[in-house]
Amino acid sequence: MVSKLPSQKHKIFLRMIYLLQKQLNPYKKQKRRKGHLNPTCSMITLISLLT
């Protein structure tokens, strides 16, 4: 299913996953940081952008 996507869309998808992971890692270590997105909220944003 992923291979059928256009390369441009696939690159954006991979970049989003990378950014999401980058965002989630500091969240687990530093929960007191203000303005940090909720992991669930980030996941919903990711899904909403893809669909």
Image (tube, helix red, strand yellow):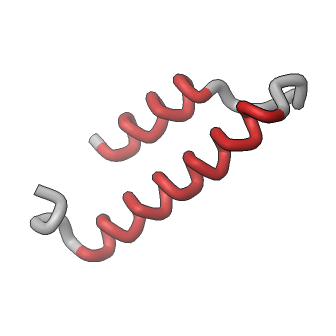
Q: Nearer the viewer, residue 41 or 21?
A: 21
Which image quarter holds the C terminus?
top left
Where is residue 32 shown, x and y percent of the image?
89, 24
**Looking at the image, how many numbered discs can be counted on the residues?**
0
Which image quarter holds the N terminus?
bottom left
The quadrant in which residue 26 appears is: top right
Where is residue 31 shown, x and y percent of the image?
81, 25
The quadrant in which residue 6 appears is: bottom left
Where is residue 44 shown, x and y percent of the image?
45, 29
Residue that appears at 14% across and 67% down? 3
Residue that appears at 37% across and 37% down? 47
Q: Nearer the viewer, residue 7 or 20?
A: 20
Left or right: residue 1 versus residue 14 is: left
Is residue 4 shown above or below 49?
A: below
Where is residue 9 shown, x and y percent of the image?
31, 65
Residue lying at the far front of the rendered structure = 29
The quadrant in which residue 19 appears is: bottom right
Left or right: residue 14 versus residue 41 is: left
Left or right: residue 10 versus residue 1 is: right
Residue that appears at 65% across and 25% down? 38
Is residue 35 shown above or below 21?
A: above
